[in-house]
Amino acid sequence: MKNVNKIFLTLLSIVFFSYFSNLYGVEFRGTGLEVYKGNSSKTKINKALDAAKEKACTNAFKKYVQEMEESKRMIFTNIEDQIYANLSKYMICDTVVVEKIDKKQKKVEVVMKANIDETRLDIEIKKSSKIFDTATGEKSRIAMIFFSRTVSAQRQYDEKVSKVDKKTKGIDINEEETDTGISSITTETNVTETGGSKLKKADISEYIVDSNDTAKLEAGMKEIFTKARFEPISGGRQIRKDWRSLKGEIIDSLENGGGIPEEARWDIEDLLMEKNVSYVVFAYFDVGVPELDAATGNQVVNAALVVADITRLGNNDPVSLGTISGVQARREGSNNDIAKNNALNTVAVQTAKELVALINSKGIN
């Protein structure tokens, strides 16, 4: 009978252990250090230990986050504040692995073992973004309409400046001095003007749109969109029958210092909705005049995102999800083309990351 009870308890322990191992099957260890002041009283040491344990548990969770698959981690960043504020809901962290107390240095150090409730955390992530929960065969299609314009020339205007020279000279007059003792004088004034106008004109930049850059920008963004469980596609190829005229209208505007015309955007959105595209991104980038790095002798190019608008398409009217701008990069290369490609790729990747974060923050698909 005793053997039967012993076997039963063993099996029960195995089942119990297996259950909680599955529930909290992801284990990480973290370290925490805390310094205290004053005497090494038991109260101060215990208080420091509690603070060090909390730091160690947070450190363990951060290690887990670093191991996340990239698309999952990108979504996690949108809810990390609420997760870190309630860490006890997502992990059990009460096992001390190492505990060191240094009374001379007045510091304590601990290593804690944390078991992450990955299932509960995944639920929160999926609630935050339906995109992450989308099956592989049901990826949202996102169309890219990208342009890059390069500064070809700049005309600068100086203010018109008037320079006035005044010369004073005496004049001999054949008459007697008056009682007041005042002699006669006259002033000669010379005026010279420089500059182009009375008011300073705004500097003008001339641009050239390089269609070859579109493929480079799409390549930089494609990897990020794919990891975020989208199906990135070229917008121009989807509407190729109408693309030539629309593209010409957009290029004309960009090369004259404007943006992507609203009318062209509306036409493109309507055409993409007919192709069952879920999202469209309109973006254009500025590429600066190449410079020479005095230290390396390489060409240096600046590239910057002027604006990127993302719109959700559907059966009803398109809905704007937001706009980002200000992403820029300065990269170098052995020649102008390489430096330009490096700068565009860096800006494209960062732009894609911010666009994905913007979509995920809406919690829609």
Image (cartoon, rainbow, N blue to C red):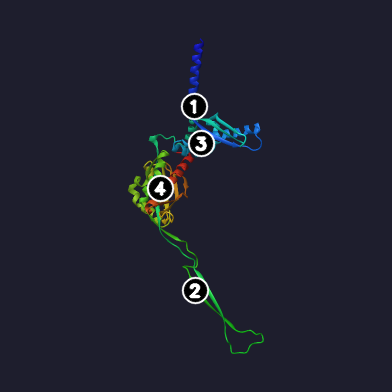
Residue bearing the label numbered 3: 62
Task: Describe the element under mark 2 as helix, strand or loop.
Answer: strand
Q: Amino acid at mark 3?
A: Lys
Q: Secondary structure at mark 3?
A: helix
Whether pointer 1 and pointer 4 mark residues with C-beta atoms closer than 8 Å, the reply is no
Residue receiving disc 1: 23
Mark found first going from the N terminus, 2 or 4:
2
First in sequence: mark 1 vs mark 2: 1
The residue that disc 4 covers is: 345
Q: CA distance from mark 1 to mark 4?
A: 42 Å
Mark 3 near mark 2, Cβ–Cβ under 8 Å?
Answer: no
Callout 2 amino acid: Thr
In the drawing, does residue 288 fall left or right of residue 54? left
Whichever of callouts 3 and 1 sits on the residue coming sooner in the sequence is 1
Mark 3 and 1 residues: CB-CB less than 8 Å, in contact? Answer: no
Residue 10 in the image: x percent, y percent? 49, 17
- Dot 2 corresponds to which residue? 192
Picture quadrant where residue 336 is located: bottom left
Q: CA distance from mark 1 to mark 2?
A: 87 Å
Q: Give the foreground label among 3 and 2.
A: 3
In the rendered image, which quarter is residue 135 located in? top left
Crowding around mark 2 (Cα neighbors within 10 Å: few <14, some 14 to 19, many 20+) is: few
- The quadrant holding residue 228 is top left
Q: Distance from label 4 to label 3 (Cα)?
A: 29 Å
- How far across and down, in percent of the image, does residue 272 sit? 38, 44
Q: Nearer the viewer, residue 263 or 281?
A: 281
